[in-house]
Image (spheres, helix red, strand yellow):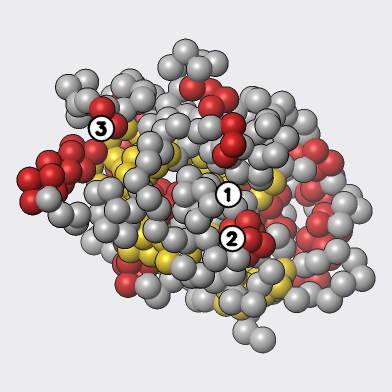
Amino acid sequence: MSSLHLVVMFRSSGSIITARPFSLSHASRLPVLLFIATNKANPRAFGTTSSILNQGPLFTKAKAMDPNLYTKSSAPSTGKWPAPSPSASILLISPTNKVLLLKRVKTASSFASAHVFPGGNVDEFHDGVTAKDEHLDNIVYRNAAIRETFEETGILLSKDSVDVSDEVRDKGRKAVYNRQITFGEWVKNQGGVPDTDSLIPFTRWITPPPAKKRFTTQMYLYFLPVSSIDSFSEKPSKIHTPTPEGEQEKEHTSAEWEYPLTWLSKAQSGEIMLYPPQFYLLNLLSPFLNDSNKDHAAQRAGLNEFLKKLPTSTAQYDALDGKFKPKVLNTHQISWADKVISPGVMFAPGQLYKEETVLSLEWPGSELGAKEGGTRGGDAERVVVVKFERNSGPGGINIVDRGEVRRLWEESEKKGAKI
């Protein structure tokens, strides 16, 4: 079996102390993915990849409807939507500004064939306790993000120098996975501290109802030091998923680093599968992290400026009416660190496009929309256009300006035909 030789980066006061290569040979649970799926019984159904696998063919054309209305009949049989489970994920950036994605094989029991960011559910045993209605970045989400990345890839993001052998690291991953020791205690025993301070919040995604499994996922960016470029390898690898003690390791993935635009191009050509949240976030990174020049530090500076800039957009949508008018108008005043996105269907297949669904991104979810009085929100400027293929997941994804969707709608109305 081939292995991926990476470099673990250790920071202290923002500077690198040591960098040592290691072989990436095991990985554990893949992150929770949020996605939008049209369902024959309920074209507004949302869920996780596992729900697709468990329910069979979901992707069908939807009849015209008002996608913004959720009725009691569309909710789970209990009549109450489940609270989103806390989870976290990391967009890990290499010294050359490539992004790490993990791929599940076709025979995987969940997330089959999808490319995903490392991450997963908050585990109170390891990470601490956070209220399910607390949809805010905090130390619990940060702990989960770093722990899950370690479990899945073997990459330990530590503040301090940690020098462990491959054998010790892999045994540690197994022990942490099986809850034989807390992640924090294991890192401490190696002389390190999880580098939670270097995580940069980068949107939160909440699975909309009426999904039976819902998640509130905090996304983060993490930059591996540019100074380690000479000792870092970005070669692709086959990796294994640790399973509970006593079971054979049977879930395999591959890990690969590519520039955001490369990942997007592969998704649009059908070479890989990306779900809307992953495609959307990579699209945001693509103008800044690319191979246009070798000044990697300058590229990062440009991205950081973008992330901190307010307003995040100068577009105005107050004049738009009907379904084109955002549910939340002030999203441009919400930083990328604080944006909360709970995708909703703006146009079902057959309403604007013949086969594609148009997803709006400004609504923060049923938990936050009314409770916060409109102070939380996502992105009113952009929408996702995606075609859900029967039995094969999403394809042909594009990010489109909301104003452009309005123009396309008017054009289709004049022609009397769908796009």
Element at label 3 = helix
Q: In this view, does 8 lie to the left or right of 389?
A: right
Say few, some or many: other residues with alpha carbon within 10 Å of mark 2 (under 14 / 14 to 19 / 20 or more): many
Count of residue discs: 3
Q: Do the residues labelled 3 and 1 touch (CB within 8 Å)?
A: no
Query: In the picture, residue 172 is in which quadrant?
Result: bottom right
Q: Earlier in the sequence, mark 2 or mark 3?
A: 2
What amino acid is found at the position of numbered circle 2 in the picture?
Ile
Q: Do the residues labelled 2 and 1 touch (CB within 8 Å)?
A: yes
Image height of 64 relative to 259, above or below: above
Quadrant of the rendering where the C terminus is positioned: bottom left
Residue to which mark 2 is pinned = 52
Image height of 336 relative to 278, above or below: above
Q: Which residue is drawn at 31% across and 22% down?
A: 329
Q: Which residue is drawn at 63% across and 29% down?
A: 138
Residue to which mark 3 is pinned = 324
Element at label 2 = helix
Q: Which residue is drawn at 52% across and 76% down?
A: 236
